[in-house]
Amino acid sequence: MSYSLIIGNGTIVDGTGAEPYPADIAVENGRIAVIAAPGALANAVAQNRIDATGLLVTPGFVDIHTHYDGQITWDPQLTPSCWHGVTTVVMGNCGVGFAPVTPEKREWLIGLMEGVEDIPGAALSTGIRWDWQSFPQFLDALDRLPLAIDVGTQVPHGAVRAYVMGERGAKNDPASPEDIAMMAKLVREGIEAGALGFSTSRTIVHRAIDGEPVPGTFAAEEELFGIGQALADAGAGVFELAPAGIMGEDLAAPDRELAWMLRLAEQTGRTVSFGLLQHDGAPDDWKRLLDAAAAAFDSGIPVRPQVSARPLGLLIGLQTFNPFSFRPSYQAAVERAGQNLDALVAELRDPALRETILTEADLPDNPMAFISMGLDRTFTLGDPPDYEPDPETSLAGDAARAGVEPFHYIYDQLLSRDGRALFYRPLLNYSRFTQDPIREMLLHPATAVGLGDGGAHVGAICDASNTTYLLTHWARDRARGERIPLPLAIRKMTYDTAQMYGLDDRGVIAVGKKADLNVIDFEALRLLPPAMAYDLPGGARRLLQRAEGYRATIVSGEVVLRDGEDTGARPGALIRSQRSH
């Protein structure tokens, strides 16, 4: 028999959590057809063959927390996620997205996405090709796109609320019973058309570009439970949210949020997935919340805390923002230079301008003042990038050892690498200069790995590389006894995330399953430093991070990336949910 693809002599990490084993894999019609002893398929006929000797073969990674809702209309690869072994993404998270929509609300939804997810509105306005209004029409539009990887999406609360309630919905007015019934109808319509879930946000940190909190931030339980019941009635869908207090903005909120989430999950039988992070305000609260959620999970209530594989932090530099970003003379220099970084660096090296910037005060109401007050928690990112730095290596510590005033020191450091140096300011999951809490979160069977925000926060963060980080930092590079076993690390990114969204056809290497696979040189796998690109529509900027060591990424049996480079294959497709009854 002949096959479309044979991967020979690889070490299989199958996604179930079982120990790795050597095997050959044959693929036909986009599915895994044969798993055989190593060398058994050496003489079989295949259109394509990959020698995986010394390499890992894993299921493709399923990233459940992305924001490619606009980018998908112009980027078939969905970079940077595809560079990190991801073969399936779920977008439409945190209550923001682009359907349902009336034509007059398109720009408003763009402003909502720009404010919440830091995606340039001009790029979205230029790049999105609108050919839908209803959510089913949006799914049909996605179905027509050429894609390298698979995509599923969710019905966003913000769009639904604005569609049903107009300005009342956008301004977070209370919903009437009639409003709730109409929202539930639209959500059920979206789920039955194939949406993988419904999403909302309740943190006041999430705001539209005009400063208004995301629609649904203050939604009453009647509204949340009415929509949750729509998922139950449809027999499908995850209820995903960014809960109040997730960023430490309200220390009393997490317990209230968890209480209603548990009741909603129990009442509807639908999985409720909520973001869980450690923050400085109450650095041990995550443990109590995880224990409570885990107890409910163990009792059969489908609630899944969603956790990150590394600290969430800002990347600081001349191309992003820095302690001088709100000083008038610095802003004037940026204005003169435009997007010409070399011109900006040349100006900033002028001794007179340097002295002026260092001695002048920030403009009033500087939203980035916390950066200036956190130089003892800001670090040179380096190459390879270090996301768990020694506290002694902070910029404040380096300045003290050099005998230089801290702001003078960071000013000069910002000019290193011709202005392309980046510095790391961890904000969440790093309260005590350690990632030990992350390890405990990752090891817990109730948690789901997510929060990478692929496609979002493009001017300050680049965490779509979380999958690679989980493999390198946690499964390989941390000290012995502190590592996460490789089979578990793979399972957390494949079987567990696929199952949470009901994607039973992927996430494991088994005969009959979808041939979404990675071939990885585990020892050579490494993250490259993030770098700024100006490749969004209209030349807007975004931070990108690549990796080395992914020898092949395969979707439905076709190699879509070889050594990190696009092959031009477009086997990706829209995933539509399957109802459970």
Image (cartoon, rainbow, N blue to C red):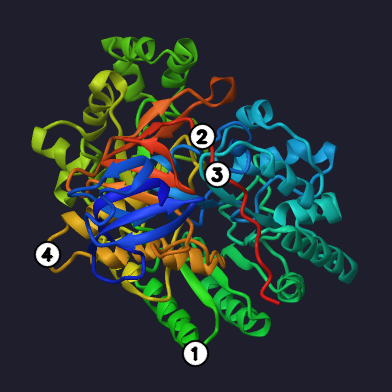
Residue 318 falls left or right of residue 31: left
- Mark 4 or 2, which is nearer the eye? 4
Mark 1 or mark 3: name the one nearer the start of the chain.
1
Q: In percent of the image, x 80 and y 67: which residue is there?
A: 184
What is the three-letter code of the residue carrying label 4?
Arg
What is the three-letter code of the residue carrying label 1?
Ser
Residue designated by label 1: 299
Q: Is residue 341 above or below residue 382?
A: above
In-front residue for pair 513/272? 513
Mark 1 or mark 4: name the one nearer the start of the chain.
1
The x, y position of residue 339, in whole percent, is 46, 16
Q: Is residue 479 above or below residue 529?
A: below
Residue designated by label 3: 572
At mark 3, the secondary structure is: loop
Q: Is residue 276 above or below residue 153?
A: below
Task: Measure the alpha-carbon separation of dots 3 and 4.
Answer: 38 Å
- Mark 1 or 2, which is nearer the eye? 1
Residue designated by label 2: 364
Identify the residue at the far front of this view. 1
Residue designated by label 4: 480
